[in-house]
C-alpha cells in the first residue's frame, strides 16, 4: 500500500461550506464523532474521532469485531454512518444520517481513495489488463490506449509485466493480490486502504504482497492498513491505532504501542497475538 508532501494547501472555503479545522493529528483524514451500527444492538464504530496526516501510514489493529474493517468501508464510502462526519484533504467528505442532508458523500473525493480487499475481488471473466482498465475507462474518462499504457506501468512496477493477458484463474494468490493493488492504483488515488490483504495468503505469498506495500510507502503513498500481522505493522506504520468494541483504546508510534503500551486492554491483546506469532 510516506512521508509525502506536506499538508494539503486549500483555497478559502465558502461560507456555505463548513471547513474541517486543522487539529494536532492532521487534517488529511478526520473522523469526528463517527457512529455506525447494524441495528440497535451491534455498534461497530462508537463515536470515534481520529485524525490522519498526509504523511501517515496508519495501521489499525485490534480483536475481531472491533470495527477495523467497518472503518475502512465507511472511509471508502461503501457504507453510510448514522452520526458524525468525516473530512478528507481538509474538505467535508461524508456526513451521518443525523445531519439532515440529502447528499451525504462527496463523490469527487470518494474517487481519490483506493481500496484493496482481503479476497482480491477481481473479475474472473476479464484478463488482468481488462480488470485494470475497466474503471479508468468507464469512470475516469481515459481512452483505452491511455488506460492500457497506465496498466503496463503499474504492472511493471509490481513485477507482473508478463501477466498482462492472463486471467485470475491462472494467477497465484500473491499475484492476484498484487493485481488488485495495481487496479486500485489505476485511478491514481491520494489515499489507499488495505483490509487484511495478506490474511488469505500462504506465508511465501504474504512476503511478496507486503514488499509491494512497503515500496508504496517508500513512494510516499498515504495508507490506512488493517492487519493482524504485528510484525508487518511495526515495519510499515508511522502510527498504530488499537481499537476494541468500536472505540479507539490507544494510539501512538509503533515503538510506543508495541514496547510499552499504556492501556491494559492493549497489553492484553498484544501479549496474546505476539505469543501466537
Image (tube, helix red, strand yellow):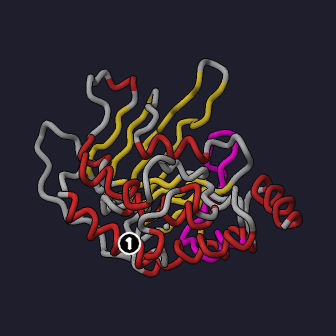
Q: Nearer the viewer, residue 259 or 165?
A: 165
x then y, percent, for residue 101: 28, 24
Residue pictured at 71% horizontal, 65% vertical: 229
Residue interval drawn in magenta: 231-251
115 relative position to 269: left or right:
left
The quarter of the picture where the C terminus appears is bottom right
Crowd class of label 1 (few under 14; some 14 to 19; many from 20; radius 10 Å)? many
State whether residue 123 is above or below residue 201: above
Residue 178 inside the magenta-drawn segment: no
For image coordinates 62% across by 42% down, the residue present is 67
**Residue in the picture at 42% in, 45% down:** 76
Vertical order, 3 against 243 (above or below): below
Q: Residue at x 58, y 55 (%)?
A: 169
* Quarter of image, res 156: bottom left
Q: Is residue 228 visible?
A: yes
Question: In this view of the protein, which residue sits in the foreground, 190 or 249?
Answer: 190
Residue 275 x/y as whole percent: 88, 66
* Residue 44 picture location, percent across and down: 61, 35
Q: Which residue is mark 1?
A: 154
- Helix, strand or loop under label 1: helix
Q: Quadrant of residue 147?
A: bottom left
Place residue 188 in its image quadrant.
bottom left
Q: Nearer the viewer, residue 37 or 253?
A: 37
Residue 250 magenta-drawn?
yes
Q: Is residue 5 left or right of residue 233?
A: left
40 in relation to 226, above or below: above
Is residue 27 visible to us here? no
Counting from the top left corner in percent of width and height, residue 35 is at 51, 33
Amino acid at each position: 500500500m510516506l512521508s509525502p508532501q506536506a499538508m494539503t494547501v486549500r483555497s478559502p472555503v465558502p461560507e456555505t461550506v463548513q471547513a474541517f479545522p486543522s487539529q494536532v493529528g492532521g487534517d488529511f483524514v478526520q473522523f469526528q464523532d463517527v457512529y455506525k451500527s447494524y441495528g440497535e444492538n451491534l455498534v461497530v464504530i462508537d463515536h470515534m474521532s481520529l485524525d490522519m496526516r498526509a504523511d501517515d501510514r496508519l495501521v489499525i489493529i485490534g480483536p475481531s469485531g472491533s470495527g477495523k474493517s467497518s472503518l475502512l468501508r465507511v472511509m471508502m464510502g461503501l457504507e453510510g454512518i448514522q452520526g458524525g462526519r468525516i473530512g478528507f484533504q481538509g474538505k467535508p467528505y461524508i456526513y451521518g444520517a443525523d445531519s439532515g442532508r440529502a447528499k451525504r458523500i462527496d463523490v469527487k473525493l470518494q474517487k481519490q481513495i483506493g481500496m484493496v480487499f482481503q479476497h482480491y475481488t477481481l473479475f474472473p471473466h476479464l484478463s488482468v489488463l481488462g480488470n485494470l482498465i475497466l474503471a479508468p475507462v468507464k469512470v475516469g474518462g481515459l481512452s483505452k490506449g491511455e488506460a492500457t499504457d497506465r496498466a503496463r506501468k503499474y504492472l511493471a512496477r509490481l513485477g507482473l509485466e508478463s501477466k498482462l493477458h492472463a486471467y485470475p484463474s491462472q494467477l497465484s494468490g500473491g499475484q492476484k493480490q498484487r493485481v488488485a493493488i495495481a487496479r486500485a492504483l489505476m485511478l491514481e488515488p491520494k489515499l489507499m486502504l488495505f483490509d487484511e490483504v495478506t490474511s488469505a495468503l500462504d506465508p511465501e505469498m504474504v512476503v511478496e504482497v507486503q514488499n509491494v506495500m512497503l515500496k508504496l510507502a517508500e513512494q510516499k503513498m498515504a495508507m490506512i492498513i488493517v492487519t493482524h500481522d504485528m510484525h508487518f505493522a511495526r515495519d510499515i506504520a508511522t502510527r498504530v491505532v488499537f481499537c476494541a468494541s468500536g472505540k479507539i483504546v490507544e494510539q501512538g508510534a509503533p515503538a510506543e504501542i508495541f514496547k510499552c503500551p499504556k492501556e491494559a486492554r492493549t497489553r492484553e491483546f498484544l501479549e496474546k497475538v505476539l505469543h501466537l506469532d
